[in-house]
């Protein structure tokens, strides 16, 4: 291993590229991959773009393909606990040693005249690792947008999918649904099948236009039908649906449409494997119940990223339907690059309680600013919290564990607003937390 990485962790090495920020474009990543022998050309790929639902679709696809007996690489972002979770094979994170060894090879290939961004470095490592591990197929989620995203280097993906599109990352992608859809449509390749979720007409028109220009066969997907709380049906195929929230009806339908596209071209994926895979799907930090210990007190919390207005609407719908008579206590942190007012207006009802917190991120919105925005939508003025621990203590201060489980009138506590806040929570409680199944 080179001296530069010999005494560093993977996180420390990747942190050294943070200073280069976000710079969309394919020139640097293509140059880097060429120096590495173009590993991205050695892997069959499913490519996923969209504003919301990408990670869920990737989770469904990984689980189904694994159940069918394939060796499946999955690449997602951001991570919640550790950089290693971005690169997994059959759901197992890359080891720290393997990540360091892979990053060392990437480091040697970097052109000293043109440094890549942090995302480009980890993306190059992903392609190299999956190629060296001889995965049967890789499920790849775009990082930002699509057209100029570092993952968008495959000329012939097996199939592409575009999930729900909303107004997010407007600084980089544009401030209209049409403009954002155009960036997402950049993953569509000539004559390669593309699965497109139901979207606003403005977005659909752009996606269809790009697909037509590239002669790419389109499958337009509507949401599956809910049979009961744990089962759904799409085009006559019934399947388990373990992920919470009505938005998973469209995400799961997209995944099944992608699998059907593979089946049509000879991939051996039985309906039994599809059902088994759907039943086994897990996706951390999205409408997920967690039990944890707070100063010796057992607590339960619902965590969700809800980092844009559309995702906040999904979350509010879920809690209203699940807890129609219970007051909501919101522990919220939001980045300053997001629509803070839109997210808060969507999440908060007048009688709710809000506990605004900072996030361990350079782009965090201050607790003071969040409190001032939230106050417009609340009867009770939010306090200002300097850290997450104090907000958790206040939010759970007068709640009891048995009540959280059994009392239908007991307030429910939700943590949301950013995946970075979810990450802060998981790291804070790493030794005292359990997933509720």
Image (cartoon, rainbow, N blue to C red):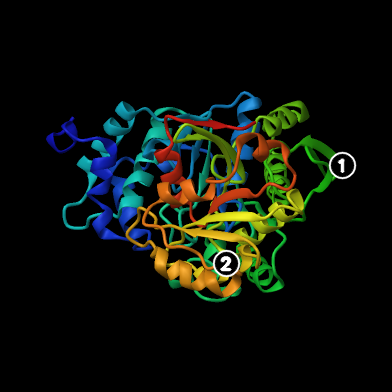
**Location of mark 2 (residue):** 380
Left or right, residue 347 beside residue 38: right
Residue 1 visible? yes
Q: Nearer the viewer, mark 2 or mark 1?
A: 2
Residue 181 visible? no
- Could you say which quadrant of the image residue 320 lies in? bottom right
Mark 1 surroundings within 10 Å by alpha-carbon count, few (fewer than 14), some (14 through 19), many (20 or more):
few
Give the residue displayed 39% in from the left and 55% down from the top.
Answer: 359
Give the residue displayed 28% in from the left and 37% down from the top.
Answer: 10
**Location of mark 1 (residue):** 236
Report helix, strand or loop for mark 2.
loop
- Measured from the top left, where is residue 58 in percent x and y? 58, 42
Left or right, residue 125 beside residue 49: left
- Measured from the top left, where is residue 14 in percent x and y? 28, 45
Give the residue displayed 38% in from the left and 52% down from the top.
Answer: 387
**Nearer to us in this view, 124 or 289:** 289
Q: Is residue 91 above or below residue 13?
A: above
**Rendered-image quadrant of the C terminus:** top right
Mark 2 surroundings within 10 Å by alpha-carbon count, few (fewer than 14), some (14 through 19), many (20 or more):
some
**Rendered-image quadrant of the N terminus:** top left
- Measured from the top left, where is residue 275 in percent x and y? 75, 31
């Amino acid at each position: 291993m080179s001296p530069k990485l010999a005494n560093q962790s993977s996180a420390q090495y990747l942190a050294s590229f943070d200073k280069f920020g976000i710079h969309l474009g394919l020139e640097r990543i293509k140059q880097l991959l060429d120096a590495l022998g173009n590993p991205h050309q050695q892997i069959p790929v499913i490519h996923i773009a969209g504003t919301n639902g990408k990670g869920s679709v990737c989770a469904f696809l990984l689980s189904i393909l694994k159940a069918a007996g394939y060796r499946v690489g999955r690449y997602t972002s951001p991570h919640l606990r550790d950089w290693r979770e971005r690169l997994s094979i059959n759901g197992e994170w890359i080891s720290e040693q393997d990540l360091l060894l892979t990053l060392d090879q990437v480091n040697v290939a970097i052109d000293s005249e043109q440094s890549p961004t942090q995302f480009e470095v980890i993306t190059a490592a992903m392609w190299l690792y999956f190629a060296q591990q001889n995965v049967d197929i890789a499920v790849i989620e775009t990082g930002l947008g699509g057209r100029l995203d570092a993952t968008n280097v495959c000329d012939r993906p097996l199939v592409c999918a575009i999930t729900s599109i909303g107004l997010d990352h407007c600084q980089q992608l544009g401030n209209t649904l049409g403009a954002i859809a155009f960036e997402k449509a950049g993953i569509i390749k000539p004559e390669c099948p593309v699965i497109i979720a139901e979207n606003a007409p403005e977005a659909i028109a752009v996606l269809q236009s790009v697909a037509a220009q590239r002669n790419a066969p389109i499958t337009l997907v509507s949401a599956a039908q809910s049979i009961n709380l744990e089962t759904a049906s799409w085009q006559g195929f019934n399947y388990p649906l373990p992920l919470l929230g009505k938005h998973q009806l469209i995400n799961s339908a997209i995944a099944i449409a992608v699998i059907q596209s593979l089946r049509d071209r000879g991939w051996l994926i039985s309906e039994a494997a599809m059902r088994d895979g759907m039943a086994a799907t897990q996706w951390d930090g999205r409408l997920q119940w967690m039990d944890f210990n707070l100063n010796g007190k057992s607590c339960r919390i619902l965590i969700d990223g809800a980092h844009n207005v559309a995702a906040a609407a999904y979350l509010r719908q879920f809690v209203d339907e699940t807890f129609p008579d219970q007051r909501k206590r919101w522990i919220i942190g939001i980045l300053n690059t997001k629509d803070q007012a839109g997210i808060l207006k969507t999440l908060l009802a007048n009688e709710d309680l809000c506990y605004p917190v900072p996030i361990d991120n350079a782009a965090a919105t201050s607790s003071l600013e969040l409190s001032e925005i939230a106050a417009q939508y609340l009867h009770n003025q939010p306090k200002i919290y300097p850290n997450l621990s104090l907000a958790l203590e206040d939010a759970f201060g007068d709640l009891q564990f048995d009540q959280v489980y059994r009392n239908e009138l007991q307030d429910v506590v939700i943590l949301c607003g950013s995946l970075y806040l979810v990450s802060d929570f998981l790291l804070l409680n790493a030794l005292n937390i359990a997933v509720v199944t």
